[in-house]
Structure formats: structure tokens, C-alpha cells
Image (cartoon, rainbow, N blue to C red):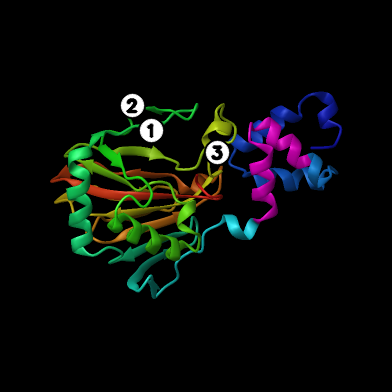
Amino acid sequence: MSTNTANSGSLRDWILSTARSGHGIDDIVNMMLRAGYNPRQARQIVAKTLDRPAVAFDMAMQSPGGKRTRHPEPPYQVVAGHRTEVSVCVEKPPIRVLEDLLSAEECEQLIALARPRLDRSRTVNKDGSNQLDTARTSSGMFFSVGETPLIERIEHRLAELVGLPAIHGEGLQVLHYEPGQQYEPHYDWFDPSQHGYKVLTSKGGQRVASVIMYLNAPANGGGTHFPKAGVTVCARRGSAVYFAYQGGDKDSLHAGLPVTEGEKWIATKWVRELPYR
């Protein structure tokens, strides 16, 4: 790419194709800087092309230390007075399996609170709305942030675990899978090249990490599979899997494998790069 790319009218196409190929925003901006663009010009062009709010974009670029999570490190972490063992550690993508992140009692309480509020699970549409999707066949519900003392306690534990304030987290989601139900391979980050990215990230910016907590152990199946890493995490009550990513990170592809016997309950927390409010 060269600085006269903009004059040829193909700069927008280059940015979009580069984003689709798996490069994050930081990568694209750095490529433009090496090609001769000044930092402000590069940020403004990328923000406009990828339909991202300029203010949120600038905040993310100017405070890189505050927008990423801290990866839990082995052998254990003590968070909010609660000890969790780090039993598996993968570097690409950053994946950590956490043992006993929740107590058995906390798992049972979450299931009991969520059960009467379950509805067919939805995915986030490009315009920011929710839609039914055949790739996701579970049922689920959302708790509002700090809705109950139990939810608030878990949120503060997770906040200390990832090194970002609780306000960076979306509301805790509980999902229920019956035999045959699954969530096909997908990414948790929002695609910067898609129309509607501005809406999806206007509140809290991009997602940067996920924590999936297993509230029970299915009789068979129901693990979380990372095909690029060749890792499958088995669902065990009280354990969790943490993984981090950037927008465009193809290594973070993952799937909720079909439950073949019994049922599966999980609670998911998505973490944003900016305060989610």
C-alpha cells in the first residue's frame, strides 16, 4: 500500500479486505503509518471506513493498557478472596481453564434464578438487535449488571480475575442446552467490516474477552471446542474457560459442542474494551 492509494479510490476497499482477512484495527493503522500516513489521519480514515465512532476509536487507541484484559496465570489465582486453579494454559489464542471458579452452591443458585426466565437464545444482529439463529439452539436469559448480591459477587470476582473494572462487563448470560443442542463455530468479537459495527460498539466498544462458566456437567458432550488451537474444554461444574481476542482474531473461533446426553448449563460474561453503559 502507498499513500497514493487514497487518490486511486481503492483505500476503502483495501481497509475492508484487510479487516476481513483477520487484521485488527491496530494492525491496519500501523500499516498505514508505515506507508506514510500521520497517526491522526490514519485513525480518522480507518474509523470512518469501518463505521466506528471516532471518539470511542480514539479512546481505545490512546489507552492500550486499559482496554485489554490480564490473562490469569498458573498455578492459581486468588480473586476477591476466592481461589481458582489454572489447570490449562494456551497462548494462541490466550486460553485459560479455571477450576472451581464458582462453588457448587453458586452454580445451583444461578440455575434456579435463571430457569423461570429462559427463552430461545438469540444472536446479535448487524444492526445491534437480537435475532433467532439456527446456529444457536439453546435457551437462555440475561441478568442485569449487579441484579442480585450473588450476581454482583460473581461480577466482582470476574473483574478482579481479568484486571478490568466490573463496569466493562456485559450482563451475565445463562444458557441451557438439551440433547442435540449446540452453538456452531463463531467469534465473540464484532466484525469491524460489517454494517452496524458502529451500533454494536457504541456502548462499551469492542469485546476483548469471554469467560464461560460451567454450572453443571452434562452426562456426555457439551464441551467448548477451539478448532484453530486444537483444544476442547470439558464442561465440569464450577470450572470455567477464559479466552481473549482482538477484533479480526481468527484464532478465537470456538463452538459449543452438541450435548449428546443429559443437559448443560453455562453462564457467560463478555468483557468490553471500554465501560459498558
Principal secondary structure, stretch drawn in magenta: helix
The residue drawn where x is 55% and y is 38% is 201
The residue drawn where x is 49% and y is 42% is 189
- Kindly tell me whether residue 216 is visible in this rendering: no
- The foreground one among 225 and 151 is 151
| Rendering quarter of residue 115 | top left
Disc 3 versus disc 1: nearer the observer? 3
Q: Which residue is mark 3?
A: 201
Extent of the magenta region = 42-63
The reply, left or right, for residue 2 in relation to residue 60 is: right
**Mark number for residue 150?**
none
Q: Secondary structure at mark 1?
A: strand
Q: Which residue is mark 2?
A: 132
**Three-letter residue code for mark 2:** Leu
The residue drawn where x is 52% and y is 59% is 69
Q: Gap between marks 1 and 2, in whole Å?
A: 6 Å
Disc 3 versus disc 2: nearer the observer? 3
The reply, left or right, for residue 233 in relation to residue 48 is: left
Residue 251 screen position, x and y as percent: 49, 48
- The foreground one among 147 and 181 is 147
**Three-letter residue code for mark 1:** Thr
Q: Which residue is mark 1?
A: 123
